[in-house]
Amino acid sequence: MNGRVRHVLIVVVCVTALWLAHPAPPEGWFDTTYIAHRMLTAPSFGDAMRFYMGYHTYPRPTRALEWWVGAHLAGEDAARYHAINVVFVGLALWAVVWLGASITGSRARGYFAGTCLAVSYVSVYPILHFPYGIQLALALVGFAALVDTEERWRTSRAAIGSACILFASLAHEIFLTFTVLPWLYHLLVRRLPRGAVVACFMGLPAWFGIQIATRPAAVPGGALLDTTVAEHVSRVLVSWLSAGLPAEMIRIFSIAAPFTRIRDSLLTLPALLLLLAVSLPTLLLLPAALWRPLTGRTVFLLLWLLAGSAPLLLPVGTPEAYHLAGALPALFLLWTEGFQRLRATGEGRPAIMRAVACAAVVLWLSLHGFARAQLFYVDLPFAGRAAHALREVIAASPEPVVALFAPAQVGGHYG
């Protein structure tokens, strides 16, 4: 099959599968409707940008631009935002397939990594919340364009890839990792266009320059979390080991009782057994992938994983599972390295370990698939009915009614 046709077909399959598996929510979740309304009613483009730049802890100029364009395309229609999110998450999945094939030289391993990202709960948030799918897609597509081994249009791909990475890194700080990845790949695996490597790296000083210029009295990094460091780190490690599930998964699987604190249930026997079950692929395949001798590719994938996840251990920001979205493709590719190492060691015990690892991946896919189904087919419809009932009460009230908060947590889900 022609390479271009194959790429288009993969994109169509990814977007179609996501569209069919994730029904459009009846409401604009989180702050979608509010931000869209402010963007549409701002007197000028500059006012819209200033509003969003001051809306978050970190000024994010390119995300402000995403919101302005998105609001003028989708208005306040939740279904349109859902369609945009699905398209860009589909592009992110295609980019992971492309990346996996380029880095490992195996299309099968690329398909495996793309499938894992599609099923992983980490890709739920960008489907629900605009414009996180755009940033994820741009970062992954940009990096995939740089590492593609095909010689045709290499200069054009380098320019487009660099621009995508720069845009994504200024839209969300978790994608600053991708400004360093081309340099690491250039050093450890294969030569890349030097201009593209330098251009991508400039995203790092550009981001810090924006923070200093727009908030001269603030310290980059935001306020410390109102949680203990141990709780913060444990949340990141849970999402890292489970490859995308938040600590709140114990609510999804009815292990933690309603209205109880996660920290009170996380160390119970059922919660630990669930964490072990969903972490088995990482616990089995990651050590196998890192068994000596290490190749440059394996070292690069490990550094990619650490660079995208280790900064989240600092007690700043929010320890959401989505913040690992830029790092987990490396983990999935390391899983394939682990399978490759087990296959290369012959028969007997390694064959048993391969069978156990395959069973662990199937169990992992089942648990993540159940969590996604619970969210989109049970909890979101329930929350939508509750929001609709609240609107009816507000509309029927003879007195003005002010809603004090909008629920960010849906059922047992967050992140």
Image (cartoon, rainbow, N blue to C red):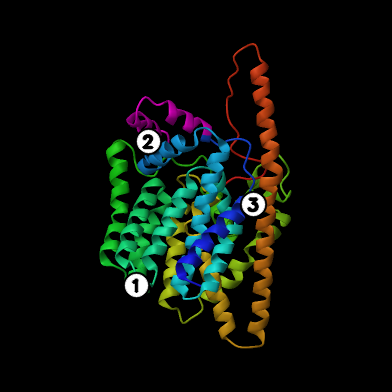
Cα separation, mark 2 vs mark 3, equals 35 Å
Task: Assess disc 3: are there few (<14), some (14-19) or many (≥20) residues with their C-alpha within 10 Å of its C-alpha.
Answer: few
Question: Which residue position is annotated with label 2?
Answer: 53
Number of the label disc, if any, that sits on residue 151:
1
In this rendering, does residue 260 appear at all? no
187 relative to 83 in the view: left or right:
left
Range of magenta residues? 33-57
Residue 324 versus residue 49: which sits nearer the camera? 49
Tag 3: residue type? Leu
Q: Which quadrant holds residue 408?
A: top right
Q: Is residue 156 above or below residue 382?
A: below
Number of the label disc, if any, that sits on residue 45:
none
Task: Assess disc 1: are there few (<14), some (14-19) or many (≥20) residues with their C-alpha within 10 Å of its C-alpha.
Answer: few
Question: Which residue position is annotated with label 3?
Answer: 20
Residue shown at the point (66%, 15%) measured from the top left: 397
187 relative to 311 in the view: left or right:
left
Mark 3 lies on a secondary structure that is helix
Residue shown at the point (70%, 33%) measured from the top left: 385
Q: Is residue 134 above or below residue 213?
A: below
Residue 148 versus residue 362: which sits nearer the camera? 148
Dot placed on the residue nearer the N-terminal end, 1 or 3:
3
Q: Is residue 290 above or below residue 203?
A: below
Residue 147 screen position, x and y as percent: 38, 68
Magenta segment, principal secondary structure? helix
Dot placed on the residue nearer the N-terminal end, 1 or 2:
2
Residue 10 screen position, x and y as percent: 53, 63
Tag 1: residue type? Glu
337 relative to 153 in the view: left or right:
right
Residue 64 versus residue 316: which sits nearer the camera? 64
